[in-house]
């Protein structure tokens, strides 16, 4: 069975940054469902170990890195730009939260860093929005 990559390359290469983050979120949720389903099947047979060739899905990290890079390159010349950039970072942090729940616990540090950066960009009013 071939491996499925989430998100599909064709899906992510068009639209605004907000729309692309939404696509990343949908793909993260689908990926999480596959991973949790695989791990629940593996839990039934405790003696069986998962090997890479049996992996059914993988998350396309190149796309999430591209979106993060584009967000970081956005201007911060005024309060509106900073707020928009902070909102996009917070939205991307939600994608990392879903991926963290898909047996990727080390992503918590990245998620927290994105939230912190988002709060800094939004100013003191957004500082109370810790997830």
Image (tube, rainbow, N blue to C red):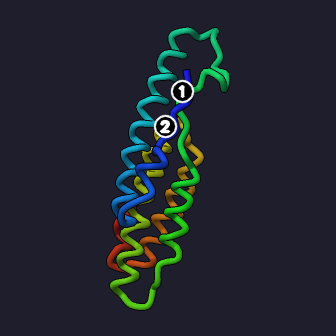
Whether pointer 1 and pointer 2 mark residues with C-beta atoms closer than 8 Å, the reply is: no
x 40%, y 64%: residue: 90
Q: What element carries label 1?
A: loop
**Residue under circle 2?**
102
> Which residue is at the front of the view, 115 or 58?
58
- Is 28 drawn above or below residue 34 in the view shown? below
Which residue corresponds to the image point at 47% horizontal and 78% vertical from the top-left?
74
Of labels 1 and 2, the one closer to you: 1
Q: Which residue lies furthest to the bottom in this view?
A: 77
Figure check: 48 above or below 5: above
Q: Which mark is residue 56?
A: 1
For the point 39% across and 65% down, the residue is 17
In percent of the image, x 36 and y 69: which residue is there? 87
Q: In this view, does 21 lie above or below 101?
A: below
- Pointer 2 local density, CA inside 10 Å: few below 14, some 14–19, many at least 20: some
**Residue 96, image x and y in percent?**
48, 51
- State how many labels appear: 2
Q: Crowding at label 1, few (<14), some or many (≥20) Cα neighbours within 10 Å?
A: some
Instruction: Give the side of residue 58 with respect to residue 79, left or right.
Output: right
Vertical arrangement, residue 4 with respect to residue 54, above or below: below
């Amino acid at each position: 069975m071939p491996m499925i990559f989430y998100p599909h390359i064709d899906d992510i290469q068009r639209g605004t940054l907000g729309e692309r983050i939404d696509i990343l979120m949908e793909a993260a949720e689908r990926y999480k469902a596959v991973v949790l389903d695989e791990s629940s099947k593996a839990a039934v047979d405790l003696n069986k170990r998962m090997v890479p060739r049996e992996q059914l899905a993988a998350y396309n990290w190149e796309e999430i890195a591209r979106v993060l890079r584009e967000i970081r390159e956005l201007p911060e010349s005024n309060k509106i730009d900073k707020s928009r950039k902070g909102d996009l970072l917070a939205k991307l942090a939600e994608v990392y939260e879903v991926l963290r729940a898909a047996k990727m616990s080390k992503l918590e540090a990245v998620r927290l860093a994105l939230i912190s950066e988002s709060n800094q960009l939004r100013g003191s009013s957004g500082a109370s929005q810790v997830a």
